[in-house]
Every structure is written in structure tokens, then in C-alpha cells.
Image: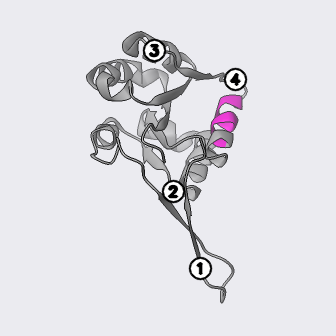
Amino acid sequence: MEKIKNIAIVTFDTKKTDLIEWSYFNKNILLNHNITAMGSAENILEGTLNKKINFIQPGNFGGYRQLRQLIEENKIDAVIIFGEAIEIENNKNLKLVLEAALRKNIIIAANRTTADFVVHSSIMEKDYSIEIKEKKEPGIREIKYQLKKAG
């Protein structure tokens, strides 16, 4: 991960107010990073941060597919989700996004507290190498490699 992180933010309708408050509270940190958002989160973040936000068009679950593709292409460093536990748990397409994020060993914050700890981490403003371990079939050694984001 480069010093400037690529952060994807997903917000459910029930948490729009939380996103507004959180983004104002963390404005100075978020301004230093590239933000990608789906649906109304893009408008909220452009308003609170007064900066251009990369937009993923939701609809027919295409937004989640596009986000998953960005993760698979190593173009997202963190996924921050604002939603109720039951909303996150029951969203099959979001689960696929989370599975991709887990495979790529990137940051996942599924609540406001974790999001606060992530953006206020001393590592947030530094380059960081991601280590990924892939397990092969039984009896075959584990493979380790590090990813360095390509610009």
C-alpha cells in the first residue's frame, strides 16, 4: 500500500447520519486519501469533504461487483462499511466483497469504532507491504508473497 490509501466506503440508508458525522470528524485525514463510494455515500462525502469522490454506480448489484473487481485488481486498500449488523450479514453481494478483501488481506472496518481506529492508526500515513498467505492442497507448502501496489 502506498502512503496515500485507496479507501472504499459503503453506506446503508440507516447509517447516512453516521457517515456524515464520521466524515466531518475525520475530514483532515480523509482529504489525504483517495475515496471511492457507492450511491448516496458519494454525495455525502463530496459534501462533507469538499473533494471529488470516485463513484461506483449501484444498481442490480453492479456496484458490489465493481467494488469486488477493484479489490481483485489491487486498487482498493481499505473497505469501510456503515450499516447495521443484520444488513451487512444478509447482503450476499457485500459478503463477496468482504471475501475478496479477506483474500487480498486489506483493511476491513465494518463499524464506526473500527473505522476510527483504522484512520487514526500511525500506519495510515505510511507505505505498507501486504503479506498474503495462500494455502494449497493438503501436503503442499504454504506460499507467502508480498504485494506492493503499482501506481
Q: In which quarter of the view is residue 148 placed?
A: bottom right
Query: Which numbered circle lies on residue 105?
Result: 2
What residue is disc 1 on? 142
Marks 1/4 in contact by CB < 8 Å: the verdict is no
Marks 3/4 in contact by CB < 8 Å: the verdict is no
What residue is disc 3 on? 51
How many numbered discs sit on the rendered protein? 4
> Which of the two marks, 3 or 2, is nearer to us in this view?
3
Residue occupying image coordinates x 33% and y 38%: 119
The amino acid type of the residue labelled 4 equals Gly
> Which of the two marks, 3 or 4, is nearer to us in this view?
3
Label whose residue precedes the other's in the sequence (2 or 1): 2
Residue occupying image coordinates x 33% and y 35%: 112
- Per the rendered image, the range of residues in magenta is 62-68
Residue 31 screen position, x and y as percent: 38, 23
Q: Secondary structure at mark 1?
A: loop
Q: Is residue 14 left or right of residue 29?
A: right
Q: Is 119 drawn above or below residue 51 in the view shown?
A: below
> Which of the two marks, 2 or 4, is nearer to us in this view?
2
Q: CA distance from mark 2 to mark 1?
A: 16 Å
Label whose residue precedes the other's in the sequence (3 or 2): 3
Query: Which numbered circle lies on residue 59?
Result: 4
Residue occupying image coordinates x 53% and y 55%: 102
Residue occupying image coordinates x 66% and y 48%: 72
> Which of the two marks, 1 or 4, is nearer to us in this view?
1
Tell me the quarter of the image containing the C terminus: top right
The amino acid type of the residue labelled 1 equals Glu
Q: CA distance from mark 1 to mark 4?
A: 39 Å
Q: CA distance from mark 3 to mark 2?
A: 28 Å
Q: CA distance from mark 2 to mark 4?
A: 27 Å
